[in-house]
Image (spheres, rainbow, N blue to C red):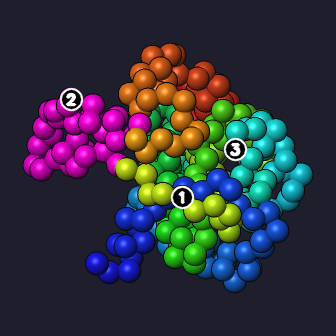
Amino acid sequence: MNETINLLKNHRSYRDFDENYVIPDEELQEILDASRQAPSWMNGQMYSIIVIRDKKIREQLVAWNPGNYHMLKSSVFLLFVADLKRTQQVAEKYQVDYPVDEGLNPLIIATTDANLAMQNAIVASESLGLGIVPVGSVRNHIEEISELLNLPDYVYPVSGLSIGKPLVDMQVKPRLPQATVVHYDTYQPYDEQLIEDYEKTMVKFAEARETKTWTKKFADYFGTKPAENVDRYLRKQKLIK
C-alpha cells in the first residue's frame, strides 16, 4: 500500500486540540496551496477559503455552535464558501444575464468545488501530522456567520474545517460495508441485513458523543422538515427564487 492510500484509509476526525500549538506559516501555506489545486468544474474554482485565526471571531462561532468548541481550540479554522460572486462580476463585465437563481445546478457546481477544495486541505493537513474535523454545523447559523464575515451576495458557507495538533488519539471509525455503497455498472438494491450488521458494529465502536444508534439518528434527522434558514439565506443571496 502506498503512502497516500494508507493516509486516506486511516483518516479520523479529532475534536481535542492543543490550544497552545501554532501551525507554522509555511505549513498553513502548503495546506492552502494544496487546497487551491483541487479539481473544479471547468476550472471555475467557484469557492473561497476564509482563514480564521482571530480569537474573538472564533469565540463567536463557538457561542453559536457550543458543541464544536474545537473551532476555538484548534490552531486555525478554515471556512469554505461556495462563491458565485466572481462569475457574477464576469457577467457584469460582458453585460450578459446571470440567471443562477433559476436552477439548482449552479449551487451544486459551487458546493462541489468548495468540498473538493476542503478535501484537499484535509489530506494535506493529515500528511503534515495534523488533526482535522469538518464542521457542517456552520450552516445552522448561516445568516449570522455571513454577516460576521461580510460575505457578499452570491456566496454561501458550505463547511468549516478545524486544524490543529491533536491531544487525544482517535480510532479509525468503521464505514458501511462496501456492498451498500459501491455499485458496478448499475445501481443494485442492498441487503438491509448489511445495515443492521453495521449498526451492531457502530454500537460496539461506542463513540462517546453518539446518543442514538446509526439508523435512529438519521431516521430522526430526515423525519423532520429541513431547516428553513438555509433556503431563506440562499434567497437573500440571490441564489434561489
Would residue 157 be found to the left or right of residue 11 on screen? right
Is 200 part of what is drawn in magenta? yes
Residue type at tag 1: Met
- Figure quadrant of the N terminus: bottom left
Outermost residue, bottom side: 26
- Label 2: which residue? 192
Outermost residue, right side: 56
- State which quadrant residue 61 falls in: top right
Q: Which residues are magenta?
A: 175-203
Vertical position of residue 192 compared to residue 43: above or below: above
Outermost residue, front side: 204
Question: How much space separates mark 3 and mark 2, taking CA atoms?
Answer: 33 Å
Residue type at tag 3: Asn
Residue 104, position as x, y percentages in the image: 44, 35
Is 110 part of what is drawn in magenta? no
Q: Which mark is residue 68?
A: 3
Labels in figure, total: 3
Q: Which mark is in front, 2 or 1?
A: 1
Whether residue 74 is visible, yes or no, is yes
Comparing 126 with 159, the one in front is 126
Query: At 84% from the left edge and 43% from the top edge, which residue is drawn?
Result: 60
Comparing 49 with 187, the one in front is 187
**Dot 2 or dot 1, earlier in sequence:** 1
Vertical position of residue 136 compared to residue 32: above or below: above
Question: How much space separates mark 2 and mark 1, taking CA atoms?
Answer: 29 Å
- Label 1: which residue? 170
